[in-house]
Image (cartoon, coloured by chain):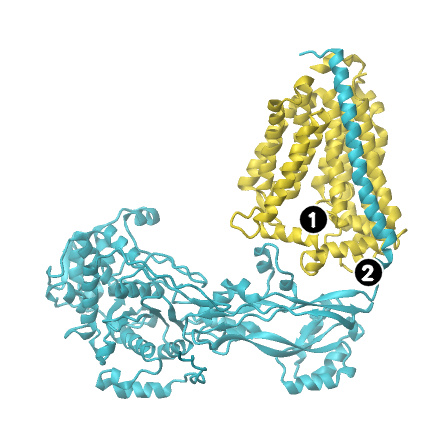
Chain colours: A cyan, B yellow
Amino acid sequence: MKKSQREILDSSRAITRRVMMLAGLQLGVVTTLALKMRSMQLDHAEEYRMLADGNSIKIRLLPPSRGLILDRNGIIVAGNEQNYRVTLTREEAGGDVEPVLRRLSQLIPMSEQRISELMEEFSRRSAITPIVLADRLSWEQFSAIAVNAPALPGVTPESALSRAYPRAGDLAHVMGYVGPVSDYDLSRIEDPDPVLRLPDFQLGKIGVEGRLEEVLRGKAGARRVEVNSAGREMRQLSRQEGEQGAAVQMTVDAALQNYAAQRMGEESAAAVVMDCFTGELFAICSSPSFDPNKFVRGISSAEYRALMDHDHRPLADKTVQGVYPPGSTFKMVTLMAGLEAGVINPGSRYFCPGHTELGGRRFHCWRRGGHGTVDAIKSLEESCDVYYYELAQRVGIDRIAVMARKLGLGVRHDLPMSAVAEGIAPDREWKMARHGQSWQIGDSLNASIGQGYVLASPLQLAVMTARIASGREVRPQLIRSIDGVRQTVPDYPPLDISEAALRVARQGMDAVMNGGRGTARSSRIAREDWRMAGKTGTSQVRNITAAERARGVISNDQLPWNRRDHALFVCYAPYDAPRYAVSLVVEHGGGGSTAAAPIARDILLFALNGGLPPLDAVPSDQRAAMEARHEAMHLYKPEAARPGRSRA
Amino acid sequence: MSYLDYQVAQVPTGFRKILHINWPLVVLVAAVCCIGFLMLYSVAGGRMDTWAEPQMVRFAIGMVVMLGLAFVPMWFWRGISVAAYVICFLMLVAVDLFGTIGMGAQRWIDFGPVRLQPSELMKIALVLLLAAYYDWLPLDRVSRPLWVIIPVLLILAPTALVLIQPDLGTSIMLIAGGGIVMFAAGVSLWYFGVVIGMGVGLVAAVMNSRGTDWQLLKDYQFRRIDTFLDPSADPLGAGYNIIQSQIALGSGGWSGRGFMQGTQSRLNFLPEKHTDFIFTVLSEEFGFIGASSLLTLYMLIVGFCLYSALTNRDRFASLITIGISGTFFLYFAINMATVMGLLPAKGSPLPLVSYGGTSLMILMLGFGLVQSAHVHRPR
């Protein structure tokens, strides 16, 4: 395509016109810039010069005080306490900090090692950065330093708030703890709040402290101060207070949590207490625990090592992170799957000879002699394994897995806690995806009694129990209110399970406690108005070899601790009008009926009674032991009665 | 091919091209870069090796690139304009898909040791393509709606990709850069009126969307707007930078505090003083004289480019020159307006002065095209 001379001329003329307009526009912009420059640098230069000059005005951040964390009754479980400390700025000390440190060591205890550590830190940091020499001083030490201030150039005694957990280890896993802001923390936050860059500022690391960090942190205040050229403050010009972070109220009852922790004692165990209808977690306790205050103050490496090396894993939150084969507590799932599928009805019977033969393998019932003829209720009451082996072959794993998920197993529940486990409700598809193998009928048999691939956390077992008890799709709730605003407890829809099937499961669980041959009969509640339903579980940690079986199965007591069975127990009460569901796992505790059920029962009683379990609620032969146990416990004293609500 | 209309034989060949390079422009660019080295030396506290030296190395490479490009015939650029645009576009898509995360946004593409910012390259490629488009389009069709929609789409497609990175600043630069080429090509002023009107409407919509569930910007972007409207409302967070930068700039006065004497920059009040806020260091240390001199140098660069465009009878060449000088103008005008508090802070470098490889190389590439247009202008 050729262009004529004329076209080219037209084009040039058009461009010329437009370039002139463009140049005009650009000149306009540049003139604006120049005028603004003139106004700032010539007309207002004096003001800016004053602001910039040596004794200029600086803005110092005031860290906000962190929001409180309360239990459901308003007891403070994470608060802030006054922390007296001293800092030293090298520049103000005249450059040489050693004589100052020596003089200071006469007022407060400071080891030679500490002094040399500090000297090294001073040489690393800039001269104008204040460095904390000592904190958590007593008032006496603090005032001694203040009085001697003239002899200690550069030393500033100051008081600041720091996080304190008055309930020590009780809620450590749920609540988490705060710690210094690391570079990693900063890198994860888009556009971080400048207050995070303050030295010694702490932010929530794990648990509720970590997950609700934004809510708890609050908003920083600021002081405008005039400083001289050395950076020393001359006077304060204005002060704008920050806003305290919002108070977070948990659903947890600190007294119940305390009792649960004490009741589990030194066992490696986890307990969850949940409201059957609202899903509120009244206690969620992992044992043994650790003192979160140590993390706030800076834990020594020896202490940290001790926590890490402890075989009971105190740092792990077993309630939500730990997953265990649920053992016989899973039998309600298999049973209801069978009932819903129409494979059995409550009256269907299987004969238990003590084992089932399948494909040349022998699957044993826990009772070698067998249970004889077993129906649905009896299968739970006596926890007959063979009944479930027979049932599983007819129901199939996929329907069992669907039922498990309906009851909250193999599903990650959304809680503001760290690393909430999903558990496993296995089915054919899962095994193919995970192991690349097809499902075997033997896998179904193992799964039917909660062994094999099935894994559940104590939280999930509590959810399962609450759902069976209430027949509703209850979800766990941990936060009751934030800043006084109730975090709504929704009305949960009914489960997609027929009432008939649920009733059979409940009756079976009732028979476990109150039936003549119930596996947990000795842990029953003696008071009829608190009648309790439950299910024991004992899950194998290892396989029993044929050789072992031939020799006679070794009892748990003879095995090393970490190879013993896990003891599990789930329960709820009252049977007629359910309120609380409890799940309890004692790692390597042995049998569910002996190791787990009594503890779960006591915790349930504490929840029902709103205080120490009354002695008349347990069978008479256990009362003396219970009384002795109560005396040995170190419980927090009940809080002073809070002002009661006015009665209208 | 319109070049065949001219007496191509008269275009200088071989090393004779060196005599026809727009030397004043080269000198001006070098002068601005030297000011940059001086400032980088100063903000590093009198050290060469921190910023000044690496920047000099990049400048040397950039200079070679620019002069090298000047030798490449103009018609070659028109030949690759479509390919250049497509490649940049694909790279933008790649960044959105696999780009590494830098400073909270996906902007870079990683080629082993080389990290490329396709959105910067796109600024040049877009100008190239639009210039080629208007060179090809007969004059009488320039303002026809159908023929206006095509370049608008060509501008909006990469802009959208940049916007989801998210990089609001660069997307505005792309729109403005493309708009300048369209403006120069003679698209009816009515269209620009409509677009500006729609822009105002969009701003109103964005501001009204805040807090609703169809919120159009991220929270931190809204905070920047708040800060811009009233820096003193949040003097510790986002407003801090602007206040400190204004103090530094204003306190320079008529002649400044002297080389290496700026207290604001010395005492670390200024953030990113070697990149986005380097103009404030210059203003603090050399005062109004220094700042307005740099502004004058910038305007001379733009002026020489526009003069070159006016005297170039080839439509493609002059549109390229106008587009690139316009982009350059946007760079420094936006940066200066930002540090003076006339525009919301958005983090853009001061062209040829700020420390940083990508923007320097892109500008040198652009000036290389301008030189090429100048050398190969029809005689």
Q: Position of residue A356 (x, y in %)?
A: 14, 58
The answer to whether residue B48 of the structure is visible from this angle is: no
Q: Position of residue A84 (x, y in %)?
A: 64, 79
Question: Please, is residue A594 above or below residue A413 in the view?
Answer: below
Q: Position of residue B348 (x, y in %)?
A: 70, 45
* Farthest right residue in view: B255
**Mark 1 is on which residue type?**
Pro
Does A539 sit left or right of B220 as displayed? left
Residue picked out by circle 2? A52
The residue sitting at 23% across, 78% down in the picture is A529
Q: CA distance from mark 2 to mark 1?
A: 22 Å
**Mark 2 is on which residue type?**
Ala
Does A425 sit left or right of A95 as displayed? left
Q: Position of residue A128 (x, y in %)?
A: 75, 68
Residue picked out by circle 1? B344
Read off the chain for label 2. A
The residue carrying pointer 1 sits among few (fewer than 14), some (14 to 19) or many (20 or more) residues within 10 Å by Cα, namely: many
Q: Which mark is residue A328?
A: none
Question: Please, is residue A112 above or below residue A552 in the view?
Answer: below
For the residue pair B147 and A172, the one nearer the viewer reads as B147
Cβ atoms under marks 2 and 1 closer than 8 Å = no
The answer to whether residue A380 of the structure is visible from this angle is: yes
Q: Secondary structure at mark 2?
A: helix
Read off the chain for label 1. B
What quarter of the picture does the C terminus of chain B occupy? top right
Select label 2 or label 1 by which is in front: 1
Question: Please, is residue A35 above or below residue A522 in the view?
Answer: above
Q: Secondary structure at mark 1?
A: loop
